[in-house]
Image (tube, rainbow, N blue to C red):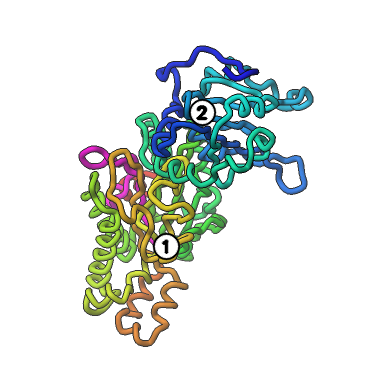
Amino acid sequence: MPPHVTTLPSVGPSKLSLRTKQHCLNVKQLMNQESGIIYLRGALNILRDDTDVEMKFRQESNFFYLAGVNEAGFQFVFDFSSHVSYLIAPFIPEAEKMWKGEPDTVEEMLSKYDVDQVVYENDLSRLIKALNPPTVFVLDTTDTAPIANAVSKEKIDSTSLKPAMYESRLIKFPWEVQLIRKVTHISSHAHITLMREVQFGKNESEIQALFEWECARNGAGYQSYLPIVASGKNAATLHYTHNNKWLNRNDNPHMLLLVDAGGERNCYGTDITRTYPVSGTFSPEAKAIYNIVLKMQQAVLDRLRPGTMWTEMQNLVIRILCQELIRIGILVGDQDEILKLGLTRAFYFHGLGHSVGLDVHDVGGRKAGVFNCLGEEEDDIARSHFLLDRPLEANMIITVEPGLYFNDVSLNAWTGFPELQKYFNLELLQLYRKVGGVRIEDTVLITENGYENLTIAPKTVDDIEALMAATHA
């Protein structure tokens, strides 16, 4: 045993809610390495600007994936040869204990976390030297300063770990599925509360606060991402997060509200979007657009199972969107010609979905450095890079989130080309612009034979109107 290590008998998996040792072993297997160590450094507390005001802490996701610790200042080592995991605890000065309280003891840390041994940070260098690894595997974002005196730069590999982490995080273990199911149910109930409580005269910020409160009081004290609470035309802006507009009946008595929000529990999150009328009743135009998006989503859900190619699902929703926009008269002309010209991108310009886990746009299913939804960091916003060349597999957790938007910037760009104007019914398009935008998003689990929709908030027009009727009579 390396020197200066405190250890207790291991805690059985039945006593643990987070079995992160499974992740360590899975990553090792994917890396196909028999020797070496993984070294990761967790996140630190961050102060706001030049003050002593702490920002809300959230652990770096890859660190949490292997260590299961959502506290600041920790480090982690996993030895491939012995399969022993070491949690490196920070030294807490006495003066800080007066303000922050006593830290966990070694015994408490071993009982809380799925690690084998605990080492304090002043013994980290001696631990690394005693293990004498041929290679130290780190992420390209890992600060290796704490181990600089214990291992030469030539032994540090910053490229091999990340692909294995990405692949491992894509397929969820049963306990991860249960965590995400729980937080998705919590978030679904928060969405239901908003449907019941939304009224003209409220501010988008009030609605955001109510969602966060509902999540927190049911065990999801964090949000997976900054909530999007977008009323009226704001719903056509994909990353609208100002959340500061008043819901004014005079602006549009049939105003829609799009809420894209999901809670987070034990660092695992979810992603849900619901769109509904503030008045409690859809206008004819809003209902027509809403049902198109619902048809797009349901067509995908009907086909979800292991072996399904995600790229085919993206093509499917685009075809349905084109058919439906021609049917209601917004697009005019031959369907194949319109698809070839890519005119549906005037209304739908983001990916169909993404992996969900420790990050809302989780790393699995895409190449390192390439984001997979809403067009960020992609070289072609018409084609998401999520699962570009592989089928769905059991125990993936993904979103299905088609949308249809009347975004002024997009529509003005597309209809600004004289040669394309003949494909748009500009008069009818003007009528539908007041709808703003509609997105319907569920977080779903791919099962052995199909899928389980983890999202339980209502989404048909009839169900939404029935739910809202009691408080909007």
In x, y percent, where is residue 87? 57, 26
Residue 249 visible in this rendered orientation of the protein: no
Residue at (39% x, 38% y) in the render: 30
Residue at (30% x, 59% y) in the render: 314
| In the displayed structure image, the side of residue 243 where residue 302 appears, left or right | left
Task: Name the residue furthest right.
Answer: 95
Q: Compare residues 180 and 11 and report the one nearer the observer.
A: 11
Q: Compare residues 256 and 228 and report the one nearer the observer.
A: 228
- SS type, badge 2: strand
The amino acid at mark 1 is Pro
- The part of the image, by quadrant, that contains residue 276 is bottom left
Is 222 in the magenta? Answer: no
Circle nearer the viewer, 2 or 1? 2
- SS type, badge 1: loop
In x, y percent, where is residue 235? 45, 60
Label 1 crowd (10 A; few <14 / some 14-19 / many >=20): some
In x, y percent, where is residue 348? 36, 65
Per the image, the residue denoted by label 2 is: 79
Residue at (32% x, 45% y) in the render: 458
| In the displayed structure image, the side of residue 304 where residue 59 appears, left or right | right
Is 453 in the magenta? Answer: yes
CA separation, marks 2 and 1? 63 Å
In x, y percent, where is residue 355? 39, 47
Q: Compare residues 38 and 361 and report the one nearer the observer.
A: 38
The amino acid at mark 2 is Asp
Q: Compare residues 331 and 328 and report the one nearer the observer.
A: 331
Residue 121 visible in this rendered orientation of the protein: yes
Per the image, the residue denoted by label 1 is: 253
- Write the start and end of the magenta stretch as one range: 435-463
